[in-house]
Image (cartoon, rainbow, N blue to C red):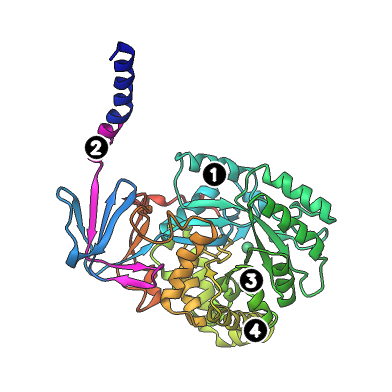
Amino acid sequence: MNLWRIATIFVFWLSVVIPSHAQQVGTSSPVTVIQGATLIDPVAGTSIPDSVIVIEGQNIKQIGNANNFKVPTGARVIDATGKTILPGMFSLHGHVGRSEGLESGQQFYNRERIQRDANAYLYYGITHMISLGLDWDPMYGFLADQRAGKVGGAHLYTGGLGFAAIGGWKPGGVEEINRPGNAQEGRELVRRALQKKPDVIKLWVDDQGGKLPNLSPEIYGAIIDEAHKNNVKVLVHLYALDEAKELMRRHVDALAHSIRDKEVDEEFLQLAKDNKVTQLTTLVGHYGDLAYAERKTDFLDDPGLPILFQDVVLQRLRERRARTQQNPELGAVLADTYLAPIRDQFEMALKNTAKINAAGIPIAIGTDSGGPTQFPGLWEHREMELLVRAGLTPMQAIQAATINGARFLGLEKKYGSLEPGKAADFVILQADPLTDITNSRKIEQVWMNGKPVEREKLTLKPSASLP
Ligand SMILES: [Zn+2]
């Protein structure tokens, strides 16, 4: 054997043996075991009682039941007996960075508020969230830093600036979004929008009952087609059944609100199935002021709110609650005028949610959280509660909040449930949401990347003055 050959073998030995030895040293990375909790598995639709979760580094290494499980020696063991563990949650429709106190608008949009909202979502165990269609350049700076591991909070995704008709819907009062006048312009604007690499595309197809111009099927069909050519999914804000059907004929990927004008029919359900459409229900958004009218505002007592939001905002909302509580007549007047259509639309949304769920069409959590008083993170838990009110089982509501969202984003191999090889992102609850869905708010800890999040340090309150 000549020297050259020996050298080659030595180099080969270096490249194979050294890294594998280095990896062995790497296995001394801390192993944590959480045992005794009930572990909810949204993929199987079951839960594992008395579970054992082995976490190595940022990922789940093993999962099982304590009866047939050998806890690795030397591991740090955390006893979670009596607790329930839920995978990190997904919200596919909210808006970050644009509200302050009881107001919202483009003028507030900045990095600090994006970070504040990302923190609020994470505080409540929402580890992934899509900000849907009102994001300006500060979002892309935030995302570059977050994806490089420089800043924390929930993983955010963006729809950049969405698409609506010329002279049509002004989302959040904003005129300057993408407004194509024909199909060709629609395609060009999609190509231009995609240069910034948004994660999804957002459409607004809503003529406010014939009051506003709307995107034509030809234009939104071209937008959807152009986005799909670039492997980007399209979500649509909408209201009406007929628009939903036409959008699904043009292969839209998700309906970002419930249908509220009519009951969904067989044709709708078949189109949704054929096109693998995901329904985001945004029930909590449609519920809106009904919560105050119906005096169902116990969410204002959630212990997280004083940590995340200004006292003055919470105080004003409590006063609003107190007013309707003390003056039932005021409630009746509101119900006759302002509240009646909201109630009708909400009831229709509940009915349609039940039908869509019964047809096996995937529902994922979307809430429109992030606007004033629409508390980011907390709203996602209220959405689960309203899904149960619509007729979903608690497990189905949890599936909507976890694996269905992960699948929509194509992240189900790493997130959305707890399995070996997936990220150790989860929420430890003090009580079981399968027996009462509101137990999902009894959060003891949120874990992300194999470590507990310091939730009380996520506070990033704005300045005390209210705009
Ligand atoms: Zn929205």
How far is mark 4 from mark 2, CA to CA? 62 Å
Mark closer to the chain start, 3 or 4:
3
Which residue is tagged 1? Answer: 143
Please name which of the two marks, 3 or 4, marks the residue nearer to the observer. 3
Residue 38 picture location, percent across and down: 28, 69
How far is mark 2 from mark 1, CA to CA? 34 Å
> On the image, which quarter does residue 224 sit in?
bottom right
Between 362 and 133, the one lying in front of the other is 362
> On the image, which quarter does residue 447 sit in?
bottom left
What's drawn in magenta, residue-wise?
19-48
Q: Classify residue 167 as left or right of residue 315.
A: right
Residue 448 picture location, percent across and down: 37, 52
Which residue is tagged 4? Answer: 344
- Mark sitting on residue 24: 2
Residue at the spot 83% in from the left edge and 66% down from the top edge: 213
Question: What amino acid type should be assigned to the residue bearing mark 4?
Answer: Asp
Q: Is residue 129 visible?
A: yes
Q: Give the secondary structure at mark 4.
A: helix
